[in-house]
Image (cartoon, grey):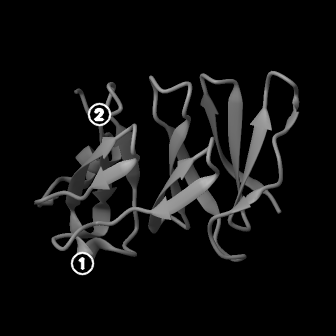
Amino acid sequence: MTYLSAEFHPSGKLLLGTSNGKLVIYDLIVAKADGEPIRIGGMEQGVTKIQAFVNNEDNPIFLVIIDQKELYLFNEKGRICRQIDFGSEGKEYMLERICNIQISFNSKFFAVGIPDKRALGIFKIDRTTLRVTPPTKWIDKVSSLHLTHLVLIC
């Protein structure tokens, strides 16, 4: 097992993504692992990216990419992980390579870049209920340069 990704959270947690599909939560305040690792992907699927939502220190949530193709929402407090629904318009983008994710500054939206389809999906999240609303329309014909340098200002 090797570590492929990491993300800090203002609550004092560090999430480490492993090559065998697990998330390791490390509590920086007490300097030790916080519980057992959580399996998200399969044994052959690595956790390739983790990104934290900000402004929610009481309920840390993260976006997690598995094997550069599957997107999950992980709630650290409840140890709940669920796959993001790309919606009826986004079915053709499921299991396509994800080149980037970007969370807006207010943590109410996030974007997902699918370079092979030149597509961008913008999702809305309710941070209280953790309900994610799939894009009603995906933006296509986006330059792959723009997909790798996503910035959401909201």
Residue 151 x/y as whole percent? 29, 34
Towards the viewer: 20 or 75: 75
Badge nearest the viewer, 1 or 2: 1
Residue 15 x/y as whole percent? 68, 42
Q: In terms of secondary structure, where does tag 1 sit? A: helix
Considering only vertical position in the picture, is 63 above or below 42?
A: above
Mark 2 Cα shell of 10 Å, populated few (<14), some (14-19), many (≥20): some
The residue that appears at 87% across and 25% down in the rendered structure is 30
Mark 1 Cα shell of 10 Å, populated few (<14), some (14-19), many (≥20): few
Towards the viewer: 135 or 98: 135
Q: In terms of secondary structure, where does tag 2 sit? A: loop
Judge from the rendering whether residue 52 lies leftward or rightward of residue 10; answer left or right.
left
Considering only vertical position in the picture, is 77 above or below 4?
A: above
Towards the viewer: 93 or 132: 132
Considering only vertical position in the picture, is 131 above or below 9?
A: below
Residue 150 x/y as whole percent? 30, 40
Amino acid on which disc 2 is placed = Val
Amino acid on which disc 1 is placed = Glu
Sequence order check, earlier mark of 1 and 2: 1
The residue that appears at 33% across and 25% down in the rendered structure is 105
Q: Are marks 1 and 2 in contact (CB under 8 Å)?
A: no
The residue that appears at 83% across and 54% down in the rendered structure is 36
| Quarter of the image where one finds residue 47 | bottom right
Residue 151 badge? 2
| Quadrant showing the N terminus | bottom right
Taking the view exactly as shown, the residue that stands out farthest to the front is: 129
The residue that appears at 31% across and 32% down in the rendered structure is 104
Judge from the rendering whether residue 50 lies leftward or rightward of residue 127; answer left or right.
right
Question: Which residue is disc 1 drawn over?
Answer: 92
Residue 107 badge? none
